Amino acid sequence: MEIVAICGSPRPKGNTATLIEALLEGAREGGAKTTRLDPAQMRIEDCTAGDECLVSAEASCRIDDDMQQIYGALRRAQAWVFGTPVYHSHVTGTLKRVIDRMYAFYTNAGGEWRLGLEGRRRGAVIVVQADSEEETPRRVAEYLEQIMRAYNVDPVGCVAASSLTKPGDAAAREDLLARAKELGRELASEAGAAQ
């Protein structure tokens, strides 16, 4: 059983990454194989709305970049994790670019919309912000859970945290690390049960 995490932060060792790593550690303890991808360190172009991906179930995005690696990982995995810091009340542009390009999983042959992914998956979300206000990270987490549901991914939980001002703050928050690790174990258990 494989879990793939998409880290939407430009900081490979920032607070988002710290909590994703705690989640993945818990998932490995639960028997899962884990993969973390960092789109900020990859070459991923914007969606150009060419719509070639919609032609048939065999069609895919015509843009030849590192998104092809992400498509493969998401197809293989039985569980997805999306993580992001809050940028201007939303996900980072890095993660939004990945989400926009996931459009290629759909087809619209003959006017009928179909998802080109087999089966159901489980998912989890990590959202962090520097500000102490708590509603925004929860709202961003709800958005990511909504995106997951559009791809037949059933969210099992999230960590939505505020007041993580500097890189390294999450590493000092035992409560958040424990919650992320437990969420990883739960995700591995839920994903294994869904197979």
Image (spheres, helix red, strand yellow):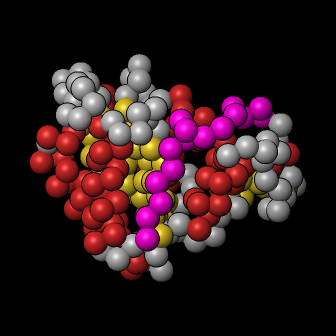
Is 63 left, or right, of 173 in this rendering?
Answer: right
Q: How many marks?
A: 0
Is 68 left, or right, of 165 in this rendering?
Answer: right
In this view of the protein, can residue 138 be seen by the observer? no
Where does residue 80 sit, x and y in percent of width and height? 47, 58
- In the rendered image, the vertical position of residue 66 relative to residue 78, given as above or below: above
- Say if the magenta span includes residue 38: yes
Residue at point 41%, 39% (across, down) = 12
Where does residue 23 sit, x and y in percent of width and height? 30, 57
Give whichever of 103, 146 is nearer the camera: 103
- In the rendered image, the vertical position of residue 106 relative to residue 34, given as above or below: above
Give whichever of 157, 149 is nearer the camera: 157
- In the rendered image, the vertical position of residue 97 relative to residue 77, given as above or below: above
The segment highlighted magenta reads 33-49
Where does residue 130 sit, x and y in percent of width and height? 26, 24
In this view of the protein, can residue 32 be seen by the observer? yes
Residue at point 34%, 60% (across, down) = 24
- Say if the magenta span includes residue 144: no
Residue at point 27%, 40% (across, down) = 160
Where does residue 119 sit, x and y in percent of width and height? 58, 71
- Which of the 4 image quadrants contains residue 129? top left
- Which of the 4 image quadrants contains residue 9? top left
Residue at point 43%, 71% (across, down) = 33
- Which of the 4 image quadrants contains residue 180? bottom left
